Amino acid sequence: MTDKSPLTLEDLPNSYIGRTIPRPNIRRLAEGRGTFTDDLTLPRMAHVAFLRSPYAHAEIKSIDTAQAETSPGVIRIVAGEEMSRYCTPWVGVLTHLKGLKSAPQFALAVGRVRWQGEPVVAVVAQSRAQAEDAVALVEVDYEPLPPVVDMETALAPETPVLHPELGDNLAFERVVEAGDVDAAFAEADAVAEEVLHFGRHTGVTLEPRVLVGDYNAGAGKLTVYMSTQSPHMMKNIFATHTGIDEDDVRVISKDVGGSFGIKIHTYPDDMATVALSVMLKRPVKFVADRLESFVSDIHARDHRVKAKIAVKDGKITAIEMDDLTGIGPYSVYPRTSAVECNQVLNLVGGPYDFANYRAVGRVVLQNKNIMCQYRAVGHPVAFGVTEALVDSAARAAGMDPAALRRNSVIPDDSYPYTAASGIKFEALSHQESLEKILKLMDYEGLRADQAKLRQEGVYRGIGLAAMIEVTNPSPMFYGVGGAHISARDGVTIRLDPTGGVTCATGVTEQGQGTEAVIAQIAASAIGVPIEKVRVVTGDTETTPYGGGTWASRGAGIAGEAALQAGRALRANILEVAGAMLQAEPDRLDIRNAAVVDADTGSERMTLADLGKTVYFRGNELPDGVSPELVATRHYSPRQFPFAFTNGVQACWLEVDPDTGFVKLLDFWVVEDCGTVINPQLVDEQIRGGVVQGIGAALYEHCIYDEDGNMRNATMADYLVPMAAEMPDITIEHVETPTGESVLGAKGVGEAGTAGAPAAVFNAINDAIGALGGKITAIPATPELILKALGKV
Amino acid sequence: MDPVREITVTVNGERLTARVEPRKSLVDFLREDVGLTGSHVGCEQGICGACTIRLDGTIVRGCLTLAVQADGAEVWTVEGLSDSAEIAALQEAFQERNALQCGYCTPGMLLTAAALLRDNAAPTRPQIREYLSGNYCRCTGYQAIVDAIESAASQMKGAGS
């Protein structure tokens, strides 16, 4: 990139970059004065509730709504056939994922249900309670079919095929082969093998999925208020499947109560709600209740991986693995459900320097809830596999696990680097990060404590996990495969005659601090106090077209657009100021919302005065001056498909061998996400992410029975991390900026979740290894640990 | 369906009379009938704590309490406690420490934290964590919330002495 400032961004006068600034826009949330979508009430708004399939797999023989129609408050009851006339089905495939296949998915099931929880009948009523009353009166006659539950047998010849037109239950398959894997294993000093299971879990956003469809028949316009990460993508999807001109669809995302990848997919109940609004020509609201969330929000993970690793001369030389994952009955539209497996194949072994890699990934269809991208897509599986293998290899080779990592990580001086799987790294800092965390945690001291406590019958373990994270995705992620998902994002910044600055951007806010980060960058680029900056997000009609928030792209992509737009606006302002002040623009600067002499810093004119002249007294401007106090810039990475980050995580915990309980004692993270814009927000993303990863490691599991029923679909039964069990987390940084942007920021939203499960898993095995125990699955429940110890 | 019942409740210091279905929860009543949307609904089973409100001086789950049970009672929500400035120190600390991300759990967290600090002006970190064990936060990982409550407690202690 050109246009590098001679000063670093942090050194620029009045820069907010690199500083902890409390998020300016959160006081209203702390007073309960946010606007979450369920807080909205529109005139004539109706409410929809769904009758969902109680079976994992069944033929719908008949639907009788007669009694329900008479229930108080009922406005309309709609089933699959009728719904399909208002909302066309969709197919979740992408052309760059070669061979990926899926079947048309309808907003309400037509003919057959394929998972427990699939919406079958929609009941619209005056109130949600009335809609639920009537749902209870709808009679559906089902003919149960044999469910395909176990992914291991989904491809067996005797197993029923979910979608006969597809021929089999194999949705996607990919093979990677690099180097000479067989030779590397034949020559190895030590080989370790594992069969690992990663449990199915889900996002559990505290605010459930919610939307209000509002079709105005007179205007022919559809407005959808929706808790979503990607308003522009949803706009395209609603238009495509309701037949309304895309330019007549507006999606507005107010406050979003957590998303983590849950609120970025096409859900049949959401589509039905929008179609009902069109059908009834009035606003219709749908809020998933918690029981619905568990069986309708996307699930994630559920991988079985067989893998082995070779070590030669104290260094990793080869990895071979076979990944199998069950994704439910459909590949989810438009991102598809092959991406997680694809990521696993890309990322396994990612932190290490080795040339021999063989991987097979298979994605199969089954009668469970749909699966798709949730925070850190594929990463917890990839590093769960890799780091479990590294620890096993260290045991097999008689090495300390830190030493094997030290010998094997990609050296810091070897970039750019192409991994065996084919992914490309611009610049990472594995060696520096590893040394930093070993010092931070006092690795040698902990090993000594561990040995001493073991003599006293106390079983503590240390788990290390090196990781990388996909951030700042280019069009190679989705757009190349035909999805209307923008990799490009823009920021429009304008100066008003008050001296205030307003930024509008296509990336969205779900609490991670996007708006604060955009404000910090814009304020720094222009030269105004952050209090002068407002940020608008989440409205397709008022923000630049863009992709929204996913794959840790907000700060790195929209942040760069904000920097460039801010610089462009600054240049425009200085041009006007120069004409007004009869000075060369390059002898002027903007500091603290005023135009100053660059050399002396003396104030020449406030931005408010400049704005007032431009807008109200343009007659005072010299001839030929045409001020443009608005600037828009867009940014999309082009040189690398992704800006990878790296980090190392470490966990110190104690296992009670009598109860199987795990007590987390300490947790450390060293993270390199490039330029840190707001240290507090970065650290809080990491902490929140680590705790979600701990949830996957210890608690969270969507448990299915052999009939395909989810058995723990309540918040009481599906456990998540709570305050009392979580440790404090210590974080340090290495900063290796990406050279592709001037800002140099990479993403950090998923790093914590990517690495934490592996760190916890390895720490448990480090603790119970002394007792001859070894776990091979997560979540590591007390029962699982007691089984590993042979106690139950 | 049950007939509607008339109830009189004092909400955030304001006395109001309303007709409600006996099955309506207190949090739905506050959100839908009174228009106070600061108390949130996360699970409707009393697990997550997002609907925590103060009923006659005690924090309760708004989803497990029926509106008719609040007849004659005094109810405080996050909006009222914001206006009265009773939880201002906590709110300040939450903002300063970024102890809220999406903000959906925050009203419940603040009411719970206020109840803790009323019982125990100087709680230890483990005591804070234990007291919050019925309030679910998916974003923060809790550490920032514990920090903020600790900091508000020490500030309130300083202001009170």
Image (cartoon, coloured by chain):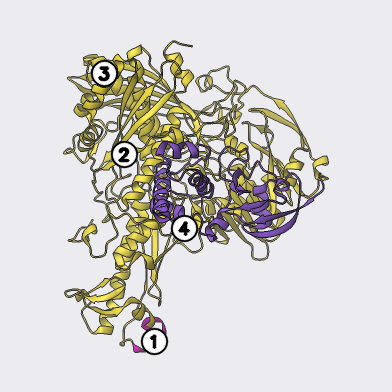
Which residue is label 1 attached to? A617
Q: Is residue A562 left or right of residue A119?
A: left
Subunit bearing disc 4? A
- Chain coloured yellow in this rendering: A
Which residue is label 2 attached to? A730
Is residue A373 visible from the viewing direction of this image? yes
Residue at figure coordinates x 23%, y 24% from the top left: A316
* Cα distance between the residues tagged 1 and 4: 37 Å
Subunit bearing disc 2? A
Residue A301 rendering spot, x and y as whole percentages: 46, 31
Give the residue type that dot 3 points to: Ala
Earlier-in-chain disc, 4 versus 3:
4
Residue B72 rendering spot, x and y as whole percentages: 72, 51
In this rendering, do the residues under marks 1 and 4 share a single chain? yes
For the residue pair A729 and A614, the one nearer the viewer reads as: A729
Q: Which residues are magenta?
A: A613-620
Earlier-in-chain disc, 2 versus 4:
4
Which residue is label 3 attached to? A451
Position above or below: A299 against A493: above
Give the residue type that dot 4 points to: Arg
